[in-house]
Amino acid sequence: MRSTVNRLMLGLTGLVLLAVGLAVLAGGLGHWPYGSAHDVLLSATARRRYRGEHWWWPTAIGVLGIVVLVALWWLLAQFRDRRIRQIQVEGRDSGDGQGVMLRGRALEHIVAAEAESLPGVAHAQAALTTLLDAPTVRLLLALAPHADPGALLTELDTYVLERARTSAALPALPAEARLRAVSHRASRVS
């Protein structure tokens, strides 16, 4: 799941790289703030140090190319959204020949609300995503201290997910449930 920290780090990395790029560009145009306009980034000695080594330049270019490709992949991954917007309910007709469409957010809210109604669940979040063109539910369940995880997962599968499958007329609805304990802040009792 994309998080605020992930986007913040991506933005901060982009700003640093933009500032460095603009500084190098300004230096190339003769407006370098550190030294004279005729100073170079690498001295002649530093450039000649590895010139005789056959591995140096292909390795340097290859590593930089990999860094650029990973950065581009990370950037594009930020904009990829695998959430399902609508599901066509098979076997249902709305009367106008279009069929019945179920909003993905509506199914997410229903699954989360029904999961929260199970004994031992303090809070639930659901996300309807697609995996290999099939709907998948991702659940994050915050468990109360008295919760029994085994019984809870059985009820989740037989009660909540089965109702979601039948209501959306899906042949299968795989689910991934992440369980975490509810953390309570310590309070002083007097």
Image: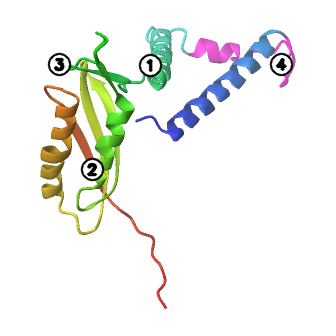
Task: Point out the frontmost of discs 4 and 1.
Answer: 1
Q: Is residue 174 left or right of residue 13?
A: left
Residue pointed to by mark 2? 115
**What distance separates the C-alpha of mark 4 from that of mark 2?**
61 Å
Q: Is residue 155 left or right of residue 121?
A: left
Disc 3 or 2, which lies upstream in sequence? Answer: 3
Q: Where is residue 98 in the image (x, y as percent from the top left)?
A: 31, 11
Give the colour scheme shown.
rainbow
The reply to whether callout 3 and callout 1 are in contact (CB within 8 Å) is no
- At 23% from the left and 61% from the top, the residue drawn is 119
- At 44% from the left and 23% from the top, the residue drawn is 77
The reply to whether callout 4 and callout 1 are in contact (CB within 8 Å) is no
The reply to whether callout 4 and callout 2 are in contact (CB within 8 Å) is no
**What distance separates the C-alpha of mark 3 from that of mark 2?**
27 Å
Residue pointed to by mark 1? 73
- At 46% from the left and 9% from the top, the residue drawn is 58
Magenta-drawn stretch contains 33 = yes
Magenta-drawn stretch contains 46 = yes
Residue pointed to by mark 4? 32
Disc 4 or 1, which lies upstream in sequence? Answer: 4
Rendered view: 157 above or below 23: below
Report the magenta residues as a range: 30-49
